[in-house]
Amino acid sequence: MYNDLKGKFVLVTGSASKLGMGHDACLRLAQEGCIVAVHGRPGKRTNPDDIAEGWEGVPSVVKEIEDMGGKAIPVYAELTDVTQVEEMFKKIDEEFGRIDVVVHCASISGPGFCLTEDFDYDMWHKVQNSNGNSFWYVAKEAIKRFKEQKSGNLIVISSVMAKHGGAGTAAYNCAKGANITLSRTIAREVAEYGIRSNCLVAGGFATDMPVVGTSLRQLMKEGMTFEEAVEHNAPWAKDLVPMKRVAPVREMSSVIAFMASEESSFITGQAINVDGGFMMTV
């Protein structure tokens, strides 16, 4: 537990997916005593299988937090729409009066394997907007408030693909690389105001991203537990990840909590690999 997080006001973007990092990050930060703005896109946009089981996205996350005795509010915005991002922060201003930490988890994966020359222009721009520009829009609004407060903490989730540059995912790789570069640029620009900016570079996590999530869900439909599905669905980890396993999202949430706390107060401008050692092998 990080005692300094108690009472901090936190926004976590991309929190509606049941198997996503954002959802779990909300729960962990609420357990730490944070008051959480749980973000999702407008409308009931989450996996149909989850909806069938009664999962409602953002309202379900808020209820989970309230049921554990925590405090949370729902916020909605299409993060590729500047106006909606601005309105989301205005609501946070009205509800919280300040914002201490922003954790940007929102992301899409793109069309699956696609060579660079085969990318459709519209899909390329969709991935760049959803993963790259959205972070800038969110960071822009957060920094304005952080500077007024003379404090703030910005955390963005990137991917090992930004550093590794895997074939067939050029749009995703570029956008996630932009997350790292922008995070570092911001860190240089705002350090004198008592603001920190860091990037967590994720790899080897069992999440709701389509390539992994759909397979996990299918295996669970066939009777496996989530843990059994993760083990069954990721034999590649034994060859590519030195730690020989796939990580549950709670392990990223632990790093997020540390980076959000004052225990990491001298860390800024970093792109920290959280990948079981994967980047050592490439």
Image (cartoon, rainbow, N blue to C red):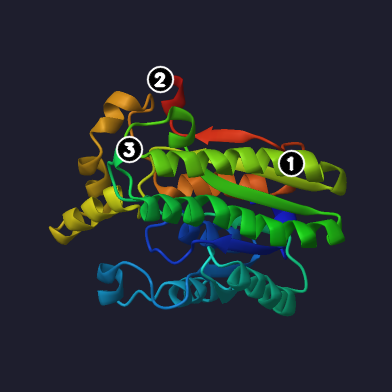
Q: Nearer the viewer, mark 2 or mark 3?
A: 3
Crowding at dot 3, Cα within 10 Å, few <14 / some 14-19 / many 20+, comes out as few
- The image shows residue 114, relative to residue 48, as above or below, that is above
Q: Which residue is mark 3?
A: 117
Q: Residue furthest left?
A: 222
Residue 26 in view in this figure: yes
- The image shows residue 276, relative to residue 123, as above or below, that is above
Between the residue at mark 1 and the residue at mark 3, the CA separation in whole angstroms equals 34 Å
Q: Amino acid at mark 2?
A: Thr
State the image coordinates of residue 76 (x, y, percent, origin top left).
54, 74
Between the residue at mark 1 and the residue at mark 2, the CA separation in whole angstroms equals 28 Å
Identify the residue at horizontal 65%, vertical 45% (top origin). Answer: 259
In primary-sequence order, the first of circles 1 and 3 is 3
Quadrant in the picture for the C terminus: top left
- The image shows residue 237, relative to residue 29, as above or below, that is above
Residue 263 in view in this figure: no
Crowding at dot 1, Cα within 10 Å, few <14 / some 14-19 / many 20+, comes out as many
Between the residue at mark 2 and the residue at mark 3, the CA separation in whole angstroms equals 28 Å
State the image coordinates of residue 142 (x, y, percent, origin top left).
71, 60
Query: Which disc number belongs to residue 281?
Result: 2
Q: Amino acid at mark 1?
A: Ala
Q: Is residue 15 left or right of residue 144?
A: left
Crowding at dot 2, Cα within 10 Å, few <14 / some 14-19 / many 20+, comes out as few
Q: Nearer the viewer, mark 1 or mark 2?
A: 1
Query: Which disc number belongs to residue 187?
Result: 1
Quarter of the image for residue 144 reads: bottom right
Identify the residue at horizontal 47%, vertical 77% (top origin). Answer: 59
Frontmost residue, 162 versus 117: 117
Q: Which type of secondary structure does the marked residue at label 1 adopt? A: helix
Identify the residue at horizontal 47%, vertical 61% (top origin). Answer: 23
